Image: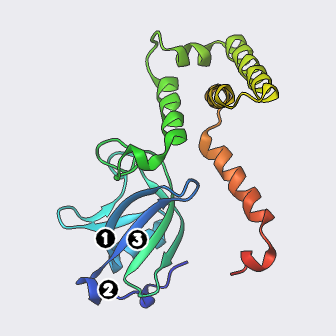
């Protein structure tokens, strides 16, 4: 996966920069540093380890549970940086956000998916999302209604209404997906796999 002997640790006084990216969405989750020991632990365990000035050798998520399972590790052309593609068990940032670069980086769909997930696990409240999650007939009825309204708006050529209805369909689709145990990440993984399969073979081999 990654040849540590190809990395230039000397350039960074014993460490390299690690850019950690969500393997499904492409969102940059965090940037940290790792020395040879940290990267060896990463290779051995399959979970991200870093080297921190204050923590020393640091297993991401060892305390919080927000571990990062390695999908791939790749060195840059100079050997002084590593791109780590991971699957996260939770937020990457200590502030509780998915990305250390703020909520804007995660994108509206990812933020919506996170909100629905939080509503699903929260204590009972008057939340409309929770009401949909707990009432099968209501959420299926609303999904059908919103889908029909989108079809009507598109048939009428009403672009403004079509945009609004599409947003409603996406929201209700995500709620319905969460209710049966799925997430946006699952959908994104399927789309990514389809995109990869549709690429010409000569491009996939590069």
Residue at which label 2 appears: 9
Picture coordinates of residue 121 (x, y %)?
A: 48, 25
Instruction: Say if residue 7 shows up in the picture.
Output: yes
Q: Rounded to the nearest whole Å, what is the CA distance between mark 2 and mark 3?
A: 16 Å
Helix, strand or loop at disc 3? Answer: helix
Q: First in sequence: mark 2 or mark 3?
A: 2
Position of 191 relative to 143 (above/below): below
Position of 19 relative to 192 (above/below): below
The residue shown at (65%, 45%) is 186
Using the image as rendered, state which of residue 62 and residue 141 is in the foreground. 141
Colour theme: rainbow
Q: Rounded to the nearest whole Å, what is the CA distance between mark 1 and mark 3?
A: 14 Å
Using the image as rendered, state which of residue 85 and residue 128 is in the foreground. 128
The residue shown at (75%, 25%) is 153
| Camera-side mark, 2 or 3 | 2
Picture coordinates of residue 57 (x, y %)?
A: 27, 67
The local crowd at label 2, few if under 14, some if 14 to 19, many if 20 or more residues have their Cα within 10 Å, is some
| Quarter of the figure with the C terminus | bottom right
Q: First in sequence: mark 1 or mark 2?
A: 2
Residue extending farthest left: 54
Residue at which label 1 appears: 33
The local crowd at label 1, few if under 14, some if 14 to 19, many if 20 or more residues have their Cα within 10 Å, is many
The residue shown at (46%, 47%) is 106
Which of the numbered marks, if any, corresponds to residue 41?
A: 3
Q: Rounded to the nearest whole Å, what is the CA distance between mark 1 and mark 2?
A: 11 Å
Helix, strand or loop at disc 2? Answer: loop
């Amino acid at each position: 996966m990654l040849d540590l002997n190809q990395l230039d640790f000397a350039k960074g006084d014993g460490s390299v920069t690690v850019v950690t990216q969500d393997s499904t969405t492409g969102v940059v989750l965090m940037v940290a540093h790792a020395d040879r020991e940290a990267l060896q632990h990463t290779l051995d365990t399959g979970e991200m380890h870093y080297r921190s000035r204050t923590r020393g050798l640091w297993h991401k998520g060892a305390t919080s549970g927000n571990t990062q399972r390695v999908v791939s590790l790749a060195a840059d052309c100079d050997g002084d940086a590593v791109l780590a593609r991971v699957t996260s068990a939770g937020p990457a940032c200590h502030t509780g956000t998915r990305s250390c670069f703020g909520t804007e980086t995660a994108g509206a769909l990812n933020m919506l998916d996170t909100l629905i997930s939080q509503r699903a696990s929260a204590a009972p409240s008057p939340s409309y999302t929770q009401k949909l999650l707990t009432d099968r007939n209501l959420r299926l009825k609303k999904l059908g209604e919103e889908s029909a309204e989108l079809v009507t708006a598109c048939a009428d050529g009403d672009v403004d209404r079509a945009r609004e209805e599409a947003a409603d369909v996406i929201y209700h689709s995500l709620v319905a997906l969460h209710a049966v145990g799925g997430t946006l990440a699952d959908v994104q993984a399927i789309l990514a796999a389809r995109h990869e399969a549709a690429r010409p073979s000569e491009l996939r081999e590069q």
